[in-house]
Image (cartoon, rainbow, N blue to C red):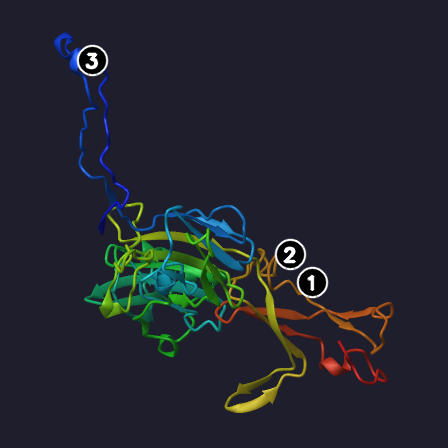
Amino acid sequence: MAIRKSTSANPKQTSVSKNELPNQARGHFRKAVIETLEQRQLMAVGPRLIGVQPNASDLLENGDVRTEALRELRFWFDDAQVIDAATLSGIRISRSGGDGSFGFASASSDFGTNGRVDIQLTSKQLGGTFELRVDRGNLGANAAPAISSVGNIISITLNTAVGSETTASALVNAINGSAAVASRLSAKINGGLPTTNLATINPTTYSPIRLTQTNDVVIQPGSALVGENPDENEVTLRFAENLVDDHYRLEVLGFDDPTLGIVGLRNVGVGGLRGDLLVPSNSNTRQETIDFRLDLGPQVVAVVPQPVLRVNGQLTQHRDTVVVYFDNDKLLIENDAQGRPTSRSVENPDFYQLLFTRDTIRNTDDGTAFKPLSVRYNASANTATLVFAGELDSLPGPGAGPVTY
């Protein structure tokens, strides 16, 4: 923190009235009494973050859930500041990569179920890494999966007892309630059916599961600009593309760390002096941090009709199939008591249809719609595979000619 002398600090003059002097001195008052005070010192301090405004809306608060796509973020610092544009790398935005945590190693697995369920495993220790080794065996009726650990190796045995097979929800509950690992590891169902049976799949197809790195993704803005005079205390970040649904962390760094390539945010120095670093609102930290979440609703990002897939080493075109790709927002999969998709499940065939256009420029003759016979959702890949009653080109019947849907 630099201490600068004011260039305008003149001695303060204090005059004393004749009536304030003793009686014997009143007739001899000739001049004002000059009192010289200590020169005034100005203390220069770094910028303080006042607020962050997304898309010219309400200020962003820690823990906010936003349902509108972010185009830009505007950072407001206290009015006395001129932000140094060379230090804007001190503003950092990252997303969790789908696991909802920052800085903690994590991994997800469908436990060999072909995406029927997706289980998220996250370390609770910063920098902690683990290896999960999964086995299965008959542990008896109503027995929970067995869990033990030696060092960073966590062993899990799934129960194969008939009627008591370990499900996805049973495994998650066992991990989170385990005295051996609950303090170091957490689990949650990230998508798919909680009732999915995990004990029928050979664990060698997916085990071991390694938690060795964080999924955090640093977002590179399309532009970062300091406002023009008189708004030089404002910084605007604009994004090159829409941000996806995820948990986000916004950091404004008030420190330098050459070993990590970190340059903290500063104001512009005066008189050749280096600018002053950001002053966090919490004196026990070196940065400002705001966590928020984007929940924009699911979006279709691609549709692939009649996909070519590899089956038993051979490429095969599935001419009765359409694969719908969604963004990374996990969708609800739900069955009723008879094992059929509920009306709100992503596997409900009523959500999908192929509309036969008859290759005309009118939509008044687009009356034929074909719904899939079945829908299978992959919670790991976030895809819905639609299977129709026959090859897509043959659905309208003979004599239909070229088929456009």
Q: In this view, does 80 lie to the left or right of 227?
A: left
Q: What element carries label 3?
A: helix
What label does residue 350 carry, if any? 1
For marks 1 and 2 on the same chain, the one whose residue lies earlier in the sequence: 2
Q: What element carries label 1?
A: helix
Percent x, y of residue 193: 50, 61
- What residue is pinned by disc 3? 20
State which mark lies toward you, 1 or 3: 3
Residue at the bottom extreme, as displayed: 314
State which mark lies toward you, 3 or 2: 3
- Tell me how far mark 1 sits from mark 2, CA to CA: 8 Å
- CB contact under 8 Å: marks 3 and 2: no
Amino acid type, callout 2 = Ser
Percent x, y of residue 389: 71, 76
- What residue is pinned by disc 2? 343
Q: Is mark 2 on a helix, strand or loop?
A: loop
Percent x, y of residue 54: 50, 53
